[in-house]
Amino acid sequence: MSAGPPSVPKPSVPYRDTRDLTPFRKTVVRTPVRDAAEGVGGLVSEILGARIRGTLFAEGGPPRLGKVAGRTPGKTAKAVHAAIFGSTDPDRLIALARASPGWAGLCYVMAGLLAYTHQEHLRASVLLQRGLSIRNDDDAHRYAAEYLSGVVTRVWVAERIEVPVLFGDEAIFLALAHSLRETGQAEAALTTLAGLPPSLPMALSRCSIAAELGRDAEVVADTEGLLNGDDLSAALLLVRVRSLRRLGRLYAARGALQEVLRRRKTDFSLRSEALTERTLLLLDSGRQTLNPRDWQHRKPSQQKTVENIRKDAEMHELWDREYGRADDG
């Protein structure tokens, strides 16, 4: 008796993360008010001596260097530790990479993450790629496992959306993808994300880049079945809405917008974007239902009114992206 055809594994859904523990921390939706508050918080931390401003951030503060795998740390480990947690200059780590070949990969990667936190995207992309291409020796691996697991990098994954990520492949490759995107290398950024496991941050970064490249059909396919469970999924749904609208699938776009607005705790700036998209969607729907000849022969004043509404909606969206809401905390 035939056992039947072999089962074909279902393709993974890019946004569905099935892990019990992930390296991601709470999503940050950036607004000028929050930026100002974080700036004040950084100054307070610097004054209190908790952390040197401009250095890499670690949960619980910079770790004290003790024994590495039961052995007293050598001069290289001490120098690398001081450069990672006590310096704001990537050049210090680059110099250590050149002086200690066995630690070079780790030093270049940490220099790249430090440059990334300073928004030096071209330099970050070069350093991260160089670090990933070099193998570390066992001492460097042991040091990283012992002392770098708490290092957090805030990675930009979409317009105004940042995700803090613990040190590891996902932090490195998401930061590299953003740096490549910022330097005009969108195709390379997409390739960089290809090997990462499914997660909302990865899916949002990937779909944002794909939408930028005009691959709206890919965005729609990758976001099929997505629900608004948190601000990351709401932001990804908004990317889906725009792609559906560009494809002319207005009914599906309305459904995605309703899902964004369904969750009451969705960040206000994301809800505001959704309302703007709804206005643009209504205008597109009105244009589709009109006979092209009727549209062309409408009174100039009526055409001007509709165009003004569209322009106001688009300006509102741009304003909200740039400045957010002043009283949004």
Image (tube, grey):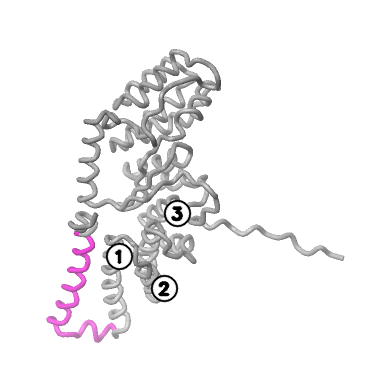
Q: Main secondary structure of the magenta part?
A: helix
Q: Secondary structure at mark 1?
A: helix
Q: Position of residue 227 (x, y in %)?
A: 45, 65
Location of the C terminus (image quadrant): bottom left
Kind of residue at badge 1: Arg
Residue 70 to residue 201: above or below: above
Quarter of the rendering containing residue 36:
top left
Q: Which residue is mark 1?
A: 271
Residue 28 to residue 276: above or below: above
Q: Earlier in the sequence, mark 3 or mark 2?
A: 3
CA distance separating discs 2 and 1: 18 Å
Q: Residue furthest left?
A: 301
Q: Secondary structure at mark 3?
A: helix
Kindly indicate whether the residue at mark 1 contacts the one at mark 2 (C-beta within 8 angstroms).
Answer: no
Magenta-span inclusion, residue 89: no
Kind of residue at badge 3: Leu
Tell me what residue is drawn at x 81 percent, y 63 percent.
3
Q: Tell me the crowding category of disc 2: few under 14, some 14 to 19, or many 20 or more residues within 10 angstroms, Cα based.
A: some
Q: Which residue is mark 2?
A: 252
Tell me what residue is drawn at x 47 percent, y 37 percent.
168
CA distance separating discs 3 and 2: 21 Å
Q: Earlier in the sequence, mark 3 or mark 1?
A: 3
Q: Which residues are magenta?
A: 292-319
Quarter of the rendering containing residue 231:
bottom left
